[in-house]
Amino acid sequence: MAKVFLKFRDNTISEATLGQTALTVGRDSGNDIQVDNPAVSGIHARIWQEGETIFIEDAESTNGTYVNGEKIIKVALNENDEVLIGKHHLEIKTGDEAQKDEEDEPLTPVTPSLDKTMILDSKIRREMTSGPKKQKGEFVVISGSAEAKCYELSDRVTTIGKSSGSLIKIKGLFAPKTVALINKTDKGYTITPVDRKTTVKINGVPIAAMQIMEDKDLVEVYGLTLQFHLR
Amino acid sequence: MKTVASFITDKGPVREKNEDYFCVDAGLGLYAVADGIGGHTAGEVASRMAVEVIKDFLSNEEKYEGDKAEGYRDDYSRESNMVAEAVRRANTAIHETSKNNSSYRGMGTTLTAALIRGDRLSIAHVGDSRAYLIRTSCIEQITNDHSLVAEQVKMGLISDEEARNSKIKNVITRSLGNTPHVEVDIEEFSIADGDRIIICSDGITSVISDSDILSIASASGGPADLCKTLVKRAADAGCTDNMTVVALHVYKDVLSYLYHFTTDFFRS
């Protein structure tokens, strides 16, 4: 029996068994696979099995369904295909693999007891206190007209706007010179909208003040949809 | 790009000495603030040495070996590497002096230096003297504080607000002169017409929030007025430390400068 796993970063959030009847993926609670994220539509996609082949179909979602980085309407899935819905991934495992995974799972989860005094390994301590490792951020253009497919955010401050100094240029007669600033801080990449009128949306939600961006966040500005990646 | 800069340094209402030091040098494109640490005259010596060594190094730019120099980082520009190297040299100079002279033992300083070349700005930074960029109506801190409270905020232990009111906010985790080698943070980005850059010692930022700095800057008439207002507001807010502000405005050409000068004049 093939299974679908809903994953966020490396964590499995839920799983469902595939069959001839299509499983629905979406934000609403009635879905077989519920994805709790504003970037995900009420019913976002459908996934089912016909014989040996597994199909996925986008349910006319707002932000689209992506397979290996390409926006899809309906495709047959191959093993190890990367399915992206909002910030979440779907992983498909065919019968044998799915079975094996279950067997591998330990019966009792091993979690250290917190009652006991612990000595914190100095390496772990350094990792804990130094915060996330220094990662480079980039924007991948998902939709809209832009000058590049991908923008590397290597400068301390990057501008999105119409002005000539902007890395990410916005077109349009009434587009402002500066729409938002991206700041590469030690707490992560932040995005600050210039004012409340120029709607900058993150995962479908308009933002009014500075916000820290997370991996796979979708940023919408003036007809441009960008996905933020940390690597 | 054209820049118009101004500065103020003030020992504040409580301290007897001013251990801050700064540099505004349009010829070199160098703008810096240093906040000295150490007893007697040591703090003053450390901050002054830091700025003078950096100025001297950048004045002899042709001697810089570029990518052949030790510690050169390919992911940053030559200019950024050069100013970082200048800061490392300042560290060595201060450290050697403090080692060899008992009255200067343990002296150190923070250092935030900005170098403008063309439309690129490079920052080399150690300690908790901050640099800010004000663009359109946004303020962005463009240096990461090397302080204990900043680490606590990063770890999620305390909020920004709690950090500003913390009793240990003066504890810094990195400084120039206290160790033989120092890790220098590098930041770089493109400047744009109308940008304002502010570099200041913690005397200012320990009592004035980022959003207040933004509103003071927005209401100010030019860099000189901005420096004056910031120092006055910090003193009124009960600052007990030395206060230093270096402020610069960036214009793409003379026309843009005249336009901003006129509007700033009528605002003040």
Image (cartoon, rainbow, N blue to C red):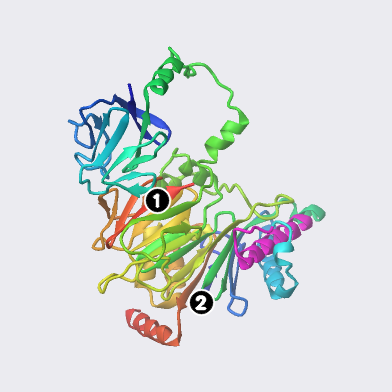
Q: Which residues are magenta?
A: B72-97
Whether labels 1 and 2 belong to a single chain: the reply is: no
Foreground of the two, B264 or B241: B264
- Tell me the tag on residue B139: none
The residue lying toward the viewer, choosing from A203 and B40, is A203
Expressed as whole percent of the image width and height from the top left, the position of residue A104 reads 46, 17
- Residue on which the image places disc 2: B5
Q: Residue A27: where, in percent of width, then height? A: 22, 37
Q: Quadrant of the N terminus of chain A?
A: top left
In this view, B103 is above or below A134:
below
* Secondary element at image label 1: strand
Tell me the crowding category of disc 1: few under 14, some 14 to 19, or many 20 or more residues within 10 angstroms, Cα based.
many
Q: Amino acid at mark 1?
A: Phe
Q: Quadrant of residue B185?
A: bottom right
Please say if B248 is above or below B132: below
Residue B257 visible here = yes
Residue A2 quadrant: top left
Name the foreground residue: B122 vs A100. Answer: A100
The question of residue B114 being in magenta is answered with no
Question: Residue flagged by tag 2: what amino acid is it?
Answer: Ala
Seen as rendered, the residue at the extreme left is: A30
C-alpha gap between disc 1 and disc 2:
36 Å
Of all chains, the one bearing label 1 is A
> Closer to the observer: label 1 or label 2?
1
**Magenta-drawn stretch contains B88:** yes
Residue A112 drawn above or below residue B207: above
Question: Which residue position is annotated with label 1?
Answer: A228
Q: Residue at x 25, y 72 (%)?
A: A174
